[in-house]
Amino acid sequence: MKNDDSMTFWEHLDVLRSAIVRIIAVAVVCGIVAFMFKDELFAIVLAPKDQGFVTYRLLFSLSSLAGGESADGGFFVQLVNTGLAQQFVIHVKTAMCFGVICSSQYIVYQLFRFVSPALYAAERRYVVRVVGFGYLLFLVGAAVSYFLVFPLTFRFLGTYQVSGEVTNMITLESYISTLMTMTLAMGIVFEIPVLSWLFAKLGFLSSAFMRRYRKHAIVIILIVAAVITPTSDVFTLLVVALPMYLLYELSIVIVRLSVDNNKNKQ
């Protein structure tokens, strides 16, 4: 039997408002803490621009083992600031974003706590597994962006020159906005398996359908990658599109194992 059947619409609205207030309060507190640790915060944010970043060191090591050049000289990108108050504004925005990230588990918990009374016990267990898996995939997507997609994109575009006479001047605002956009986009992209599973559960999708229209999916993936990619170069497009294609193939496997097999048993 479902809970809270006697609550009115306005009572539900009050509960939702209380949850939103708690979410905002926790996110703001986490953001203030992140703001206070400025050096540590921007050591993380600015790490991908340095040639000593873990991704670059790993690539240099692999290149050395393969007999290629292992030297990392020449890779240096200096960020510049072009506005009087811009660095302070970026500091606040970045701290607030980290506040939301740090409080994301609490946010998910509060949202689940709000909707759980309307669910049966079996539905609650089901939702916990799905939301937990989706949350984990989002974090993995954000990590892939931070450790792989963004560093490779930044190094390629930050050092690219049409002529030796043209010097690159990358602004701090451009760097931060690109990092945040790509991280958010990759986090959302990594939800493809969850969405595919959901549509399959609703009867809108099957693994056979996904295999049949794989070529069409590749075209759509390239279009989506072009939209979420902040630049128009082919390199960045492929770096973003490749994980999306792998997720599509993973989605086919998940749909076949979890949905199609259950239908066949029935």
Image (spheres, rainbow, N blue to C red):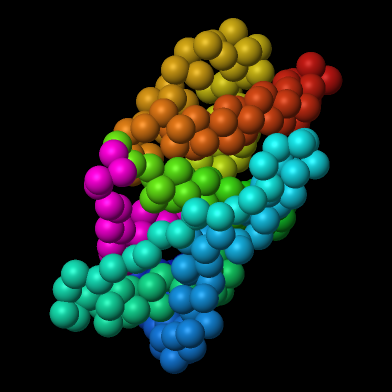
Start-end of magenta stretch: 163-183
Describe residue 136's horizontal placement relative to residue 237 as left or right: right
Residue 262: x and y, percent? 78, 25
185 inside magenta stretch? no
Of the pair 42 and 253, the residue shown nearer to us: 42
201 relative to 106, above or below:
above
The quarter of the rendered structure image containing the C terminus is: top right
210 relative to 197, above or below:
above
Q: Residue furthest left?
A: 84
Q: Residue furthest front?
A: 165
Of the pair 95 and 82, the residue shown nearer to us: 82
Residue 78: x and y, percent? 37, 64
The quarter of the rendered structure image containing the N terminus is: bottom right
Q: Residue at position x 66%, y 18% from top?
A: 207
Q: Residue at position x 52%, y 36% from top?
A: 239
Describe residue 84's horizontal placement relative to residue 42 as left or right: left
178 inside magenta stretch? yes
Is any part of residue 228 visible from this angle?
no
Residue 168: x and y, percent? 29, 53
Q: Residue furthest right?
A: 265
Q: Residue at position x 44%, y 37% from top?
A: 236
132 relative to 62, above or below:
below
Q: Residue at position x 32%, y 80% from top?
A: 92
113 relative to 31, above or below:
above
Is any part of residue 252 visible from this angle?
yes
